[in-house]
Image (spheres, rainbow, N blue to C red):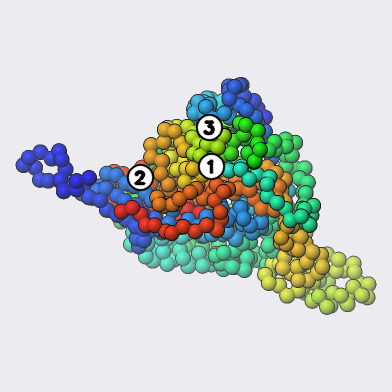
């Protein structure tokens, strides 16, 4: 199924859940309210129209500093705008961060994080990206439903997102850090975690 | 947990107890740093916990701090056994974000080097796995073959391990002059080694006994864990990114996707052995089909033209004869002198980092380099997000890149193929004997750099 009809099929099944959609560079993308996630994922897996049997990737993006990076003033306009080759789809523009711009003075309801799911259907050979904005209104540790009951692979991927972003997964059987050690403070891939921050290495608990 | 006595053991029976055995983080039979905590009943594994993260370097965080081309050396260090595939995956993701495509010759070059990398990766995996089961000579033979291939890689990229060969919008330099012949020869040598390894292992009683029936996983479980690559194909599922979502020029090349039936260690070994043969096939076809690059030699004399001589020719107006040829400069990389690369770059000077020969040799190259590496300049893709998968040696290697329109990526995420396999490791080990950890873990082909990033 191509990107447009795939998005339409998701919209037809979840008219309330789908907040927005786009197919920037041909990647079918649907932005979904978090309360619909588990139901939508189950549908994607089981519905014969989708047959998304692979959860290829699960990650998150912290959009809190999106668009705030300063360009050096003198060079502000020396950047390179590249026009795409004709064979690469460019018709559908990217609408911006899925949860809105969560910078200072943002409108209420804008979300800081986006949990990103990449699904793939082996029988039908199509891919879908599902984005779930979380972390509205200064939630310290936002929470979203776990998909580990549907895909076994979600277990470790969700642990990694918890480790790196501090997003909790409701229904995960054993949410603990995976790449960092237990005594580590903070979540390193959050944008407010300084890149040069050092912490003492603490060995495993036993 | 009381380790002295199983609470339920009936009176009069010999007391049994479960034992905790810690394997790792630096066990000699481990290919990387990993810790497996096993709970044993006799020699049988009843439960296991896998701990990873010992090689975490913060790749994804670092990728947010450097410019787009600056990430390429870091990608070398993800799967360091086949770095060229990582290079290619990352560059193709950024190219998709930018919306540019590279010339055909560049695609072919990338395909050739990444298939060579795939062979080296499988050679290492199968060789090391066999060594751990006692077949030391197979390991030596396979490392010998890997050496032939690494010599090719060194010819093309100038380095053996940390190659950094691809660029956003092209590759660092063209294939060196006369690459065909040593390449074909190395592939023939590799074939011989594969035949030797096949003779030594495939019907070897000890090897088959250790590999067959151990580390089993069903196709449904493998899909549920998100396992891809040879590991998935050994369970009988025919999924290969090169076939199912073809990229570069894989759709023009003939190759088969080998699949297994039982999903055990032995099938994984057979699949990897056959995949090496298929990769050799791909490289041979690509060498045959690759569009010609620019010529270094003078069309009349058939020898390369030194730069000074070319200037003299130009001064006397003899331009027609040399218009398509290139002067010899002092190359840092043999292939780089061949062209001022019309056939290997995307034709988009605002993106492609010029070869060192250009940077040092002419003002256009210098300016192009300046505009790409100086602070505040560099590639600035439009705002957006893309996901691009390629077939890594261990499975689907995906790069998810988010751009905020500045010269460094807002977020780079790697989908490491062996992460999914490692998360299924408890499933593979439970029920097997403790001695089966070695062949099973060997066939997982864990690469720490890619797993922990």
Between residues B443 and B449, which one lies in front from this camera angle? B449
Q: Residue at x 37, y 57 (%)?
A: A203
* C-alpha gap between disc 1 and disc 2: 23 Å
* C-alpha gap between disc 3 and disc 2: 25 Å
Q: Position of residue B365 (x, y in %)?
A: 78, 65
Residue sitting at the far right: B317
Q: Chain of mark 1?
A: A
* C-alpha gap between disc 1 and disc 3: 17 Å
Q: Position of residue B380 (x, y in %)?
A: 72, 51
Between residues A129 and B145, which one lies in front from this camera angle? A129
Tell me if B30 is positioned left or right of A15 in this view. Answer: left
Q: Provide the secondary structure element on which disc 1 rests.
A: strand
Q: Callout 1: few (<14), some (14-19), or many (20+) C-alpha neighbours within 10 Å? A: many
Q: Callout 2: few (<14), some (14-19), or many (20+) C-alpha neighbours within 10 Å? A: many
Q: Which residue does the numbered mark 1 point to in the structure image?
A: A59
Against B133, is A141 above or below?
above
Q: Callout 3: few (<14), some (14-19), or many (20+) C-alpha neighbours within 10 Å? A: many
Residue sitting at the far left: B12
């Amino acid at each position: 199924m191509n990107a447009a009809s795939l998005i339409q099929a998701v919209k037809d099944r979840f008219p309330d859940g789908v907040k927005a959609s786009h197919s920037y560079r041909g990647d079918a993308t649907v932005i979904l309210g978090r309360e619909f996630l588990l139901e939508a994922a189950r549908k994607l897996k089981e519905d014969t129209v989708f047959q998304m049997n692979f959860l290829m990737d699960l990650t998150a993006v912290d959009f809190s500093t999106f668009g705030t990076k300063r360009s050096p003033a003198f060079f502000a306009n020396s950047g390179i705008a590249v026009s795409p080759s004709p064979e690469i789809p460019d018709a559908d523009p990217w609408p911006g961060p899925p949860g809105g711009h969560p910078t200072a003075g943002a409108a209420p309801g804008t979300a800081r994080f986006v949990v990103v799911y990449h699904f793939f259907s082996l029988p039908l050979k199509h891919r879908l990206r599902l984005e779930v904005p979380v972390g509205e209104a200064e939630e310290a540790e936002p929470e979203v439903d776990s998909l580990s009951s549907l895909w076994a692979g979600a277990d470790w991927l969700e642990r990694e997102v918890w480790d790196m972003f501090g997003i909790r997964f409701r229904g995960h059987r054993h949410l603990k850090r995976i790449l960092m050690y237990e005594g580590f403070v903070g979540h390193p891939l959050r944008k407010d975690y300084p890149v040069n921050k050092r912490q003492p290495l603490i060995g495993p608990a036993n | 947990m009381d380790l002295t006595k199983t609470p339920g053991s009936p009176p009069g029976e010999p007391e049994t107890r479960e034992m905790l055995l810690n394997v790792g983080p630096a066990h000699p039979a481990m290919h990387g740093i990993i810790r497996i905590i096993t709970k044993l009943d006799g020699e049988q594994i009843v439960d296991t916990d896998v701990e990873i993260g010992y090689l975490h370097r913060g790749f994804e965080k670092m990728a947010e701090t450097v410019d787009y081309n600056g990430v390429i050396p870091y990608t070398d260090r993800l799967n360091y056994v086949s770095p060229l595939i990582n290079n290619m995956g990352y560059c193709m993701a950024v190219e998709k974000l930018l919306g540019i495509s590279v010339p055909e010759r560049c695609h072919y070059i990338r395909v050739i080097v990444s298939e060579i990398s795939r062979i080296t990766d499988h050679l290492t995996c199968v060789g090391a796995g066999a060594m751990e089961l006692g077949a030391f000579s197979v390991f030596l033979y396979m490392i010998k073959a890997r050496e032939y291939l690494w010599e090719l890689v060194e010819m093309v990229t100038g380095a053996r391990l940390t190659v950094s060969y691809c660029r956003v919008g092209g590759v660092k330099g063209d294939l060196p002059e006369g690459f065909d012949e040593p390449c074909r020869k190395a592939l023939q040598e590799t074939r011989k080694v594969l035949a030797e390894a096949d003779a030594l292992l495939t019907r070897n009683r000890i090897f088959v006994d250790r590999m067959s029936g151990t580390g089993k996983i069903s196709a449904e479980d493998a899909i549920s864990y998100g396992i891809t690559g040879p590991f998935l194909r050994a369970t009988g599922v025919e999924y290969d990114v090169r076939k199912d979502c073809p990229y570069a020029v894989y759709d023009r090349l003939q190759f088969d996707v080998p699949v297994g039936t039982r999903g055990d260690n032995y099938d994984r070994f057979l699949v990897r052995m056959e995949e090496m043969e298929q990769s050799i096939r791909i490289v041979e076809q690509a060498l045959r089909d690759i569009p010609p690059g620019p010529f270094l030699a003078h069309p009349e004399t058939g020898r390369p033209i030194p730069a000074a001589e070319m200037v003299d020719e130009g001064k006397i107006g003899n331009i027609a004869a040399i218009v398509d040829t290139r002067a010899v400069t002092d190359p840092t990389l043999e292939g780089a002198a061949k062209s001022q690369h019309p056939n290997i770059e995307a034709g988009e000077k605002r993106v492609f980092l010029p070869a060192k020969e250009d940077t040092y040799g002419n003002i256009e190259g210098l300016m192009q380099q300046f505009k790409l590496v100086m602070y505040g300049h560099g590639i600035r893709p439009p705002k957006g997000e893309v996901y691009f998968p390629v077939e890594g040696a261990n499975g689907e290697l995906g790069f998810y890149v988010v751009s905020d329109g500045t010269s460094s990526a807002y977020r780079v995420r790697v989908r490491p193929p062996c992460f999914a396999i490692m998360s299924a490791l408890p499933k593979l080990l439970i029920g097997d004997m403790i001695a089966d950890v070695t062949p099973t873990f060997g066939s997982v082909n864990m690469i720490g750099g890619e797993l922990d990033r």
